[in-house]
Image (cartoon, grey):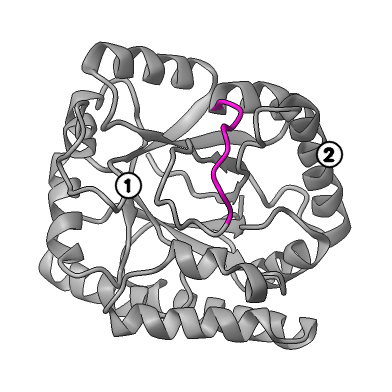
């Protein structure tokens, strides 16, 4: 089973006043889809389950509306759109995680990305279920079991192979600000028989990134020159005029699509407006999808 989708990431709002803001967010998505010609293109929203991260996060983490609560508010406003989400497993014991996943699937989540500990901790830490264990434990409960794929991360080939061996059906990439995913998937295809679906993630970069730096922080990997180049590209996007910003992002999208389209992986697209949905973001997403969309022919 493949998702064959365009998924829009929507982060749950802060808990205080969250239901009203969730409703407003859904209405904006519907309006921007209509205005940009994306009606019928976006088939899923992807709702991340947020946990506290490093203290140096440029935008401090506040308590968020729960994924299920957020979904219950926005779903009636986006009736043609289904749900995907991420679920942190590393701090939940097996009974609690089993109950949570049953609730997510019962609410209509068609895919779940299993996520582990924050980057300040070591893989395998946490008192709960490791994501790689969850992939095999919940094969029958969760038909579409996802993992995070970071093509610039050291050792990612072995990590991704192991996750596929354990039962991952798709990988959702970290936000792509280079075409490193092309060489990664080409090499992976050459050395592995696994062909999981890949959700290619692209994010709009507004001017506020220049002063806040949230996107650069999210993709950071200190000492990794490939990521330093991506962060430099993010800064260039943030400082560019709207037309140039759109051209640069669409050019990147085209390079990635052209590079991976014939490698044998089912492909979906994951779109993110990290600072919140906006008309310019949707205009850029529409131009990307006019070049190629997994929904063509459906």
The kind of secondary structure the magenta stretch mainly shows is: loop
Cα distance in 3D space between marks 1 and 2 = 32 Å
Residue visible at 63% across and 44% down in the picture: 10
SS class of the residue under badge 2? Answer: helix
Q: Earlier in the sequence, mark 1 or mark 2?
A: 2
Residue 206: image location, x then y, percent: 70, 70
Q: Measured along the vertical axis of the image, is residue 241 above or below residue 154?
A: below
Q: Quadrant of residue 18?
A: top right
Give the camera-side residue of 80 and 131. 131
Give the camera-side residue of 120 and 248. 120
Residue 19: image location, x then y, percent: 74, 25
Q: Dot 2: within a 10 Å radius of its alpha carbon, few (fewer than 14), some, or many (20 or more) residues?
A: some
Disc sitting over residue 118 in the figure: 1
Q: Measured along the vertical axis of the image, is residue 140 above or below residue 4?
A: above
On the question of residue 240 being in view, the answer is yes
61 drawn magenta = yes
Residue 142: image location, x then y, percent: 34, 26
Q: Measured along the vertical axis of the image, is residue 249 above or below residue 105?
A: below
Exactly how many numbered labels are in the figure? 2
Decide if residue 154 is on the left or right side of residue 144.
Answer: left
Q: Nearer the viewer, mark 1 or mark 2?
A: 1
Disc sitting over residue 27 in the figure: 2
Decide if residue 242 is on the left or right side of residue 297.
Answer: right
Residue visible at 30% across and 73% down in the picture: 152
Residue visible at 35% across and 73% down in the picture: 181
Q: Quadrant of residue 38?
A: bottom right
Q: Dot 1: within a 10 Å radius of its alpha carbon, few (fewer than 14), some, or many (20 or more) residues?
A: some
Decide if residue 204 is on the left or right side of residue 142.
Answer: right
Span colored in magenta: 59-66
């Amino acid at each position: 089973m493949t998702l064959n989708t365009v998924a829009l990431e929507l982060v749950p709002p802060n808990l205080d006043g969250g239901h009203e803001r969730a409703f407003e967010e859904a209405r904006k998505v519907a309006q921007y889809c209509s205005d940009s010609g994306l009606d019928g293109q976006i088939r899923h929203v992807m709702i991340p389950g947020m946990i506290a991260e490093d203290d140096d996060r440029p935008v401090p983490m506040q308590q968020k509306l729960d994924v299920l609560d957020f979904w219950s508010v926005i779903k009636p406003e986006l009736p043609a759109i289904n749900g995907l989400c991420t679920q942190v497993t590393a701090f939940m014991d097996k009974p609690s995680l089993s109950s949570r996943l049953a609730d997510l699937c019962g609410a209509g989540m068609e895919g779940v990305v299993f996520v582990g500990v924050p980057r300040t901790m070591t893989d395998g830490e946490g008192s709960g279920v490791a994501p790689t264990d969850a992939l095999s434990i919940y094969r029958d409960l969760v038909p579409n079991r996802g993992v995070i794929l970071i093509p610039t991360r050291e050792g990612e080939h072995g990590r991704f192979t192991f996750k596929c061996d354990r039962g991952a059906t798709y990988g959702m990439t970290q936000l792509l600000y280079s075409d490193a995913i092309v060489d990664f998937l080409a090499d992976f295809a050459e050395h592995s028989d696994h062909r999981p679906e890949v959700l290619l993630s692209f994010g709009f970069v507004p001017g506020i990134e220049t002063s806040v730096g949230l996107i650069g922080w999210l993709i950071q990997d200190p000492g990794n020159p490939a990521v330093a180049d991506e962060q430099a590209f993010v800064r260039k996007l943030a400082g560019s005029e709207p037309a140039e910003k759109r051209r640069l992002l669409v050019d990147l999208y085209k390079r990635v699509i052209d590079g991976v389209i014939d490698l044998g992986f089912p492909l979906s697209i994951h779109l993110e407006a990290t600072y919140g949905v906006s008309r310019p973001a949707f205009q850029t997403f529409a131009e990307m999808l006019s070049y190629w969309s997994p929904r063509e022919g459906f």
